[in-house]
Amino acid sequence: MDLEDKDVIKSLRQQVTRLAINMEKMKLAEYVDLLHSPWRLLWVNFTSGIARGLGIAVGFAILGAMVVIILKWLVGLNLPLIGGFIAQIVLIVQEQLKTGRY
């Protein structure tokens, strides 16, 4: 073996080592195990879906509450055009809450 062949082999070893390290970082073996277990895959996807749905619901509730607070603040400023429009929206919402029709 000449010097060039040794350099090529050394370079290939380094690349294979880097590839192995990257595969470990990606947790490729765990992912393949997950794909071979359909019930576990369904369970993981189910629980992540519930978590996402709960996060969306909580986030939307917080965002909605912030919008209502801002609208109340704008009505309190008594701006000519915006205040009347927002007051009508608030009255409509209050009527809907009183009648129980959504």
Image: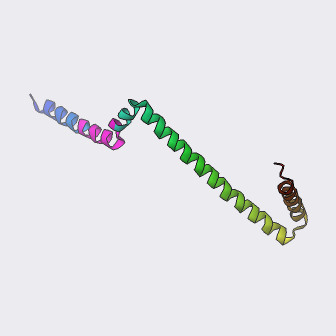
Along the line of sight, the residue nearer the viewer: 79 or 75? 75
Prevailing SS of the magenta stretch: helix
Q: Position of residue 89 (x, y in %)?
A: 86, 57
**In the picture provided, is 82 more to the left or to the right than 46?**
right
Residue at the spot 36% in from the left edge and 41% down from the top edge: 26
Residue at the spot 83% in from the left edge and 52% down from the top edge: 100
Q: Position of residue 96 (x, y in %)?
A: 85, 54
Along the line of sight, the residue nearer the viewer: 10 or 46? 46
Q: Which segment did they paint magenta?
A: 16-29
Give the answer, above or below, for where 80 lies relative to 8: below
Q: Give yes or no for residue 21 being in the magenta stretch.
A: yes
Residue at the spot 50% in from the left edge and 38% down from the top edge: 45
Along the line of sight, the residue nearer the viewer: 83 or 60? 60
**In the picture provided, is 45 more to the left or to the right than 60?**
left
Q: Position of residue 11 (x, y in %)?
A: 21, 36
Q: Give yes or no for residue 86 being in the magenta stretch.
A: no
